[in-house]
Amino acid sequence: MTQAQPPRLETSMPLIMAAASSGLPSFCQKTGFHFCDAEEIVDSIQTAGLWVGPRPILEGDSNFRQTIPYIVLRYGDKIVQYTRTASGGEGRLHGRTSIGLGGHIDLDDIVSINSQIDLPNTLANAAARELEEELGITEFQEQRWIGLLVDNESAVGRVHIGVVGLWTLRELPSGASEDAIGNVELCSLDRLLASKDVMETWSLMLLPEIESQLLKQPSRTRAA
């Protein structure tokens, strides 16, 4: 009788960083945006327990949350918005508008010190790479991490956590560098609020905080 063979794992699966769900702070049990300063963000994710594993496996394992830098770009009193095109890998997002740029933390993004992941520099590396890939942007006037995004209402949401940055542009982006990014535009707050019906979940959850940030901290940079 032929002996059953164990399933073969694809050796070329991309490796990404995730945090152990059970170790995250109790406030992460509530869906929504949670304001945190940079130090609290790092402490929340680092102490949860970090793991680097194959993306296809992590996509279906709610014991871990894939850690996603989610960067909002500001210019004066306006915010960069774009549309996710059919070229993107996430079919559920096609045609949706977004105010967050970024993606998974790849193995090459990770910085380590004494065999431990240096989370602040790892987050910065991943965010900078994504923004250069998506919009060709490499310089910013100000970079601030402002909180965490959690969605416990869907299977997809339960395997991700967003690390939100509000970064101020030195100059306007010339357009998208990736096919998955379409219709890049600079939008007023009123324009963003008017497009809520077609906005992706994370951006929609984040919108009230962005409204608050724009109203209480006007930028020194003025849009043309």
Image (spheres, rainbow, N blue to C red):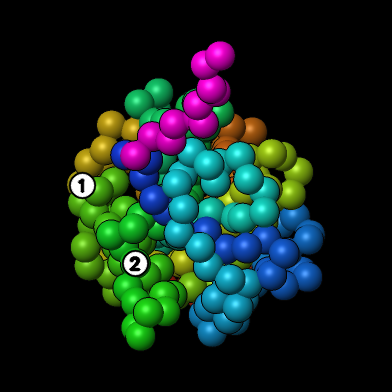
Residue 96's tag is: none
Q: CB atoms at circles 2 and 1 under 8 Å apart?
A: no
Residue type beneath disc 1: Ser
Residue type beneath disc 2: Ile
Q: Earlier in the sequence, mark 2 or mark 1?
A: 2
Q: Could you classify mark 2 by the number of other residues whose Cα lies within 10 Å: few (under 14), some (14-19), or many (20 or more)?
A: many
Residue on which the image places disc 2: 110
Classify residue 114 by image quadrant: bottom left
| Residue in the picture at 46% in, 67% down | 166
Residue 209 falls within the magenta-colored stretch: no
Secondary structure type for disc 2: loop
Instruction: Compare residues 162 and 50 and report the one nearer the observer.
Output: 50
Secondary structure type for disc 1: loop
| Residue in the picture at 34% in, 67% down | 110
| Residue in the picture at 36% in, 45% down | 14
Q: Along the horizontal axis of the image, is 82 left or right of 175? A: right
Residue 6 falls within the magenta-colored stretch: yes
Instruction: Compare residues 67 and 220 and report the one nearer the observer.
Output: 67
Classify residue 89 by image quadrant: top left
Q: Is residue 158 above or below residue 209?
A: above
* Quadrant including the C terminus: bottom left
